[in-house]
Amino acid sequence: MMTLYFIRHAESEANKKNILASQMDYPLSKKGMEDARHIAEKFSVDNRVDKIISSPLIRAVQTAQPFSDIFNVDIKTNSNLLEQHLGRFSGMTYQDVESEPHYEHDKTKRWNWEPEGGGESYRMISDRLKIFFDSLDHEGNDKNILVVSHAVTLRIIRALLENTIPKYPVVLAKNGEVWKTEFQGLLNAHVIQSFHYI
């Protein structure tokens, strides 16, 4: 059976400054770079990786790099793993959006909410993630695949894996949090284990 590992990128400069990074290309902070290396080293003690698939955003690729170095596996990027596009709210701080009447403050009501300025609803993220999961069909069943992505994207990934869509978890994965599941295809309710190496 295919084993999937998911990791939210380590601390970025946007995280450090409480900025809604959206699909803007913020790099990891110095702490994030150190944490990514530490997580990869701890992870490698008990796990192996045959393939790495990452969001193309630099904070995700930088998180994937230590895993690539340790396991000697190239990083493949997939745009379906990008973070939510927040339209005109991209780059604002959390404090900025507090006073924005058109920002959906209720985390439970974002399934159909499309942020102004070309943003994505959670439904739209779910649609592109289904394409990503469909792309795994050609991978070998004995593969161990590491997927590097982002907070909101992982929120929807978890809902897809636990087969709760259109409901999704309100709590986000922490920076550097790792999930593991034995992938059985969508429409099955997967058991997800969480690991914290920092």
Image (cartoon, grey):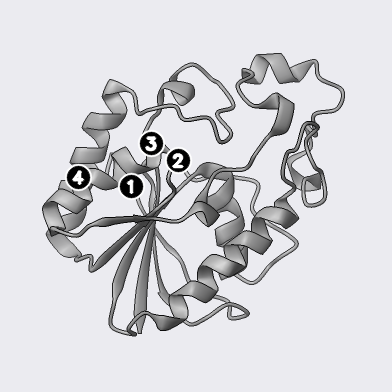
Instruction: Give residue 129's quadrant in the image.
Output: bottom right
Q: Amino acid at mark 1?
A: His
Q: Amino acid at mark 3?
A: Ile
Compared to 25, does 178 lie above or below? below
Query: Which residue is label 4 attached to?
Result: 66
Query: Which residue is label 3 attached to?
Result: 58
For image coordinates 65% across by 39% down, the residue present is: 85
Query: Which residue is label 1 attached to?
Result: 196
Q: CA distance from mark 2 to mark 4?
A: 19 Å
Q: Is residue 42 visible?
A: no
Q: Nearer the viewer, residue 141 or 159?
A: 141
Q: Position of residue 16 (x, y in %)?
A: 44, 20
Tag 4 secondary structure: helix
The extreme right residue here reads 101
Q: Amino acid at mark 4?
A: Pro
Q: Amino acid at mark 2?
A: Lys
Q: Is residue 94 left or right of residue 150?
A: right
Query: Which residue is label 2 attached to?
Result: 174
Q: Please name which of the two marks, 3 or 2, marks the residue nearer to the observer.
A: 3
Q: Please name which of the two marks, 3 or 1, marks the residue nearer to the observer.
A: 3
For image coordinates 75% across by 47% down, the residue present is: 121
Instruction: Please tell me which of labels 2 and 4 falls first in the chain.
Output: 4
Q: Nearer the viewer, residue 17 or 26?
A: 26
Tag 1 secondary structure: loop
